[in-house]
Amino acid sequence: RLARAPDGAIAVTDRWGHERRYAAVLSTCQTWLLTTSIETDERLFSQKLWMALDRTRYMQSSKTFVMVDRPFWRDRDPVTNRYRMSCTLSDRLTRGTYLFDNGPDRPAVICLSYSWMSDALKVLPLPPERRVALMLRALSAIYPDVDLPARIIGDPVTISWEADPGFLGAFKGALPGHYRYNRRMYCHFMQDDLPPEQRGLFLAGDEISFTPAWAEGAVQTALNAVGGIVRHLGGAAPAANPGPAESFAALAPVELPE
Ligand SMILES: Cc1cc2nc3c(=O)[nH]c(=O)nc-3n(C[C@H](O)[C@H](O)[C@H](O)COP(=O)(O)OP(=O)(O)OC[C@H]3O[C@@H](n4cnc5c(N)ncnc54)[C@H](O)[C@@H]3O)c2cc1C
């Protein structure tokens, strides 16, 4: 739970009911969690920011991994001299198949499938074994001479980010018209003009950035949030090396009419 404590601090209550109070709090989880797994006091954000947080749109994504006995894909086909198998982008169910080796003759890993959106939804209700069977069937049409099932050791590992209560989606996929929402979230680290009851809770992460699905944007927004927190606590970057807060006026995303 996130709430304003009577002394003005932000009170963070964990799942065991322990409350701790802080002058500043940084939230880096998916923004949808602020209205689902985290009980967030509505007064901590403006209604316009809540609208942005709630309208953030997440993409679905799924991956399915199996472990194999060794990186057999590095072997050459004696007839064609081509690799047995390689990174495979397909318009079939698998979409993206990636190969990870850990040295010759050591167990290796195949990501049988990395898919997004509709393709991820196709496997959402399916258990790991069924997902693997479907992926192997699709790959057997592409590699008829490779006996993939004979290579597999161990149980498959699969994830659908949208089915994980700690995520509810893989990463932001902003829709046309969402610039205004993105700008609200991205600029929230500058809190000078906010009413006192909306200060102290900061946001960073993939969906706060303008470049979701890339770690770089998460890092950039983290730096912004740190700059905002330092300012909130009364500090500043050195004059010769200005931080995001000091550079905000010059570099802020353009404000467009709503
Ligand atoms: C399938 C997929 C593929 C990707 N591929 C690439 C790529 O190739 N290159 C690239 O640069 N980026 C890629 N990304 C994006 C990259 O993973 C993200 O940009 C980055 O991980 C975002 O970092 P973050 O700290 O914002 O959030 P996350 O790494 O998502 O961390 C948020 C954390 O908050 C935790 N959390 C949730 N709820 C709570 C709670 N109540 N209390 C405490 N903790 C909580 C979550 O468990 C999670 O660990 C990919 C992402 C996905 C999902």
Image: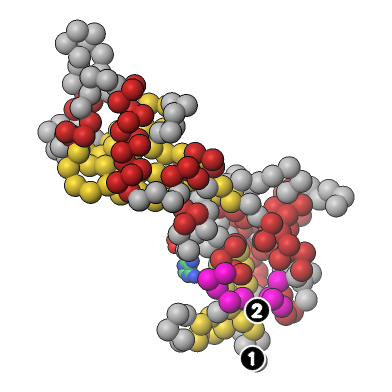
Q: Which mark is residue 41?
A: 2
SS under mark 1: loop
Question: Please, what is the dominant secondary structure of the magenta stretch?
Answer: loop
Q: Position of residue 65 (x, y in %)?
A: 31, 43
Residue 222: x and y in percent read 55, 58
Residue 42 percent across, percent down from the top left: 69, 76
Which residue is most to the right? 257
Find numbered disc 2 in the image and state the secondary structure of the residue it sits on: loop
Q: CA distance from mark 1 to mark 2?
A: 15 Å
**Residue visible at 42% across and 84% down in the picture:** 16
Above or below, comparing residue 69 to residue 154 in the picture? above
Q: Which residues are magenta?
A: 36-45
* Type of the residue with mark 2: Asp
Q: Nearer the viewer, mark 1 or mark 2?
A: 2
Q: Is residue 24 magenta?
A: no
Residue 223, visible in the rendered structure: no
Q: Which disc number belongs to residue 7?
A: 1
- Left or right of residue 138, residue 175 in this image: right
Q: Where in the figure is residue 164, as x and y percent of width and height?
A: 45, 59
